[in-house]
Image (cartoon, rainbow, N blue to C red):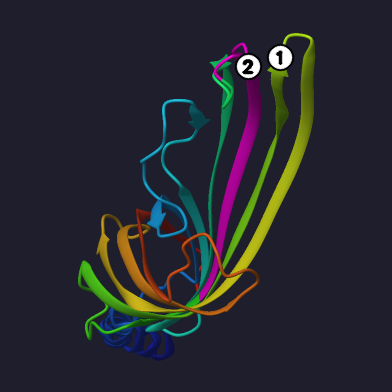
Amino acid sequence: MLAPRLALGTLLLALPCLSRAQTTEPAPVPKFYVGLGAYGSFYQSLGGRFSNEKGFPVPLQLTAGYQLRPRLAVQLGVAYSGFTSRYDVEGYYFTADPAAPEAYYHYTSTSTRRNTSVSALARYTLTRKLAHRVQFDVLGGLTLEHYNGYARGTETQGYVNNLQVTNFDQRYVQNTLLLSAGASVRYRLTPRFDLNLDYTLNHSVLTGRPSRGLNSLTGAAALGLRYRFGQR
């Protein structure tokens, strides 16, 4: 009878220790995250389009990240926007010869423009207490801006008995590499969902064709939701 009583007493004495050990064990930290949000930059503007342009009005950014350490993460982001515009103009115009009849013209075209921004950034958390709902980060890395556009159509002009028809098909591609650095603020809605706002300043270091109003220093911002999953 002595051995069972000793075992029972030892178990009762150990229960408080086991309880304290369980409460001090750190909670699992999500290891991966994905996000979706609205995006705006010098290369992908929010609005400002003409009435004949069709497309989604707000560029969207998809992000995926991996938590290397409690304060350090790396993330990849892809933002996209594109729209199509159509023109169909017909009329008459006067030539330099006042005695000549009015000349006829007819112009039709379909233009498409697509912009893609691919960013690879490191994210370091400045807030000391990671349990706080509000977190501040600094960002740094590279961004690749890809622009692809084309225009196709016909141009008809001249007199009724002598019309000249010209077909055109133009394509334009430009890639720009940027150095990106900025800041971010995150608000934890739930243990899995964050509301985040990122802002970066971008400096162009390499471009395929120096046109399209290329600026050396530009800004970009993204506002959206992030979902964390997985555990360490």
Residue 150 in the image, given as x and y percentages of width and height: 68, 43
Answer with left or right where residue 135 lies relative to residue 92: left
Residue at 68 percent across and 57 percent down: it is 173
Q: What stretch is highlighted in magenta?
A: 98-120
Q: What residue type is labelled 1?
A: Tyr
Residue 35 in the image, given as x and y percentages of width and height: 45, 56
Q: Where is mark 1, residue-wise?
A: 159
Mark 2 or mark 1: name the one nearer the start of the chain. Answer: 2
Q: Which amino acid does label 2 sit on?
A: Ala
Q: Determine whether the residue tagged by mark 2 lies in a helix, strand or loop.
A: strand
How far apart are the two marked residues, 2 and 1, measured between alpha carbons? Answer: 5 Å
Answer with left or right where residue 133 lies relative to residue 171: left
| Residue 122 or residue 17, whichever sits in front | 122
Q: Where is mark 2, residue-wise?
A: 103
Task: Give neighbour class at mark 1: few <14, some 14-19, many 20+ (Cα, 10 Å).
Answer: some
Q: Determine whether the residue tagged by mark 1 lies in a helix, strand or loop.
A: strand
Q: In which quarter of the image is the N terminus?
A: bottom left
Q: Say which quarter of the image contains residue 131.
A: bottom left
Query: Is 79 covered by the magenta stretch?
Result: no
Residue at 29 percent across and 82 percent down: it is 12
Task: Give neighbour class at mark 2: few <14, some 14-19, many 20+ (Cα, 10 Å).
Answer: some
Residue at 62 percent across and 11 percent down: it is 101
Residue at 58 percent across and 56 percent down: it is 116
Residue 119 in the image, given as x and y percentages of width and height: 53, 69
Verify CB contact (< 8 Å) between mark 2 and mark 1. yes
